[in-house]
Image: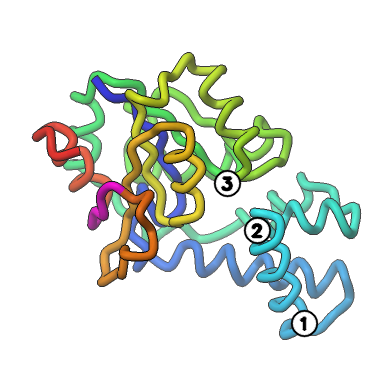
Amino acid sequence: MLDLLIDLDNTVYPENTNIFKQIDFKMKSFISKNLKVTLDEAYTIQKKYFINNGTTLRGLMIYHDIQPELFLNYVHDIDLSNIKNNNLLNKLLKNYKGKKIIFTNGSYNHANNVLKKIGLSKNIDHIFDIIEAAYIPKPDIRTYQKVIKKYSLQPLTTIMIDDLPNNLKTAKDLGMKTVLIKNHIFNSKAYDYIDIISSDLSDTIQKINKGII
């Protein structure tokens, strides 16, 4: 049975719930307040650090000595009411025999709150968050190696599931199978390290059970 490394935001819940849009705005707001810049300037900083450092938080820690707990508590203080209980996904994960590990650049508390809202808490085995990663985010290979070691994973029998292509490249380099979660048209020709594009996590589990992945 294949083990699963599952991203959290826009992966265990649909992108159209706009949960991550809230987080995105709060990151911009945090930067504006703490670096004393306009929201437009904050947005530029936010995206620059995300691209260059894997997460906005990593850039803020490196260049501005921002305390990560302050940032994480602020940006994850959001309204989760758009996330609905997912009975199908809950049933699929309950019956899935491989390891089921949430692998997120967010915090444990945020992941736990989201999983409770969807109803998945009892059917996820572990949460590996950015704090446990020593704030070194995906797609840095060191963090993947740490996850592999901690949970005794074999890359050749592990599937990485994420909504961001860059996070899947490291997984593929390590020998994992890769699934990109996208519920809209996506040109995958430039991403030869993506094995399957799936509409959502339930669809992914069903494909795994059918041997498609």
Q: Which residue is mark 2?
A: 75
Q: Is residue 6 above or below residue 85?
A: above
Mark pair 1, 3: CA separation:
25 Å
> How is the model colour-coded?
rainbow
The magenta segment is 195-199
Residue 64 or residue 124, whichever sits in front: 64
Asked whether the beta carbons under mark 1 and mark 3 sit within 8 Å of each other, the answer is no
Where residue 56 sits: x, y (%)? 70, 59
Q: Is residue 196 magenta?
A: yes
Where residue 46 sits: x, y (%)? 70, 69
Asked whether the beta carbons under mark 2 and mark 1 sit within 8 Å of each other, the answer is no
Which secondary structure lies at badge 1?
helix
Q: Residue at x 35, y 68 (%)?
A: 16
- List the single residue furthest toward the left: 210
Please, what is the three-letter code of the amino acid marked with disc 1?
A: Glu
Crowd band around label 2 with a 10 angstrom C-alpha radius: few (<14), some (14–19), many (20+): many
Q: Is residue 178 above or below residue 11?
A: above
* Labels 1 and 3: the sequence-earlier one: 1
Q: Which residue is mark 3?
A: 139
Q: Is residue 24 magenta?
A: no
In the image: residue 68, left or right of residue 93: right
Question: Which label belongs to residue 41?
Answer: 1
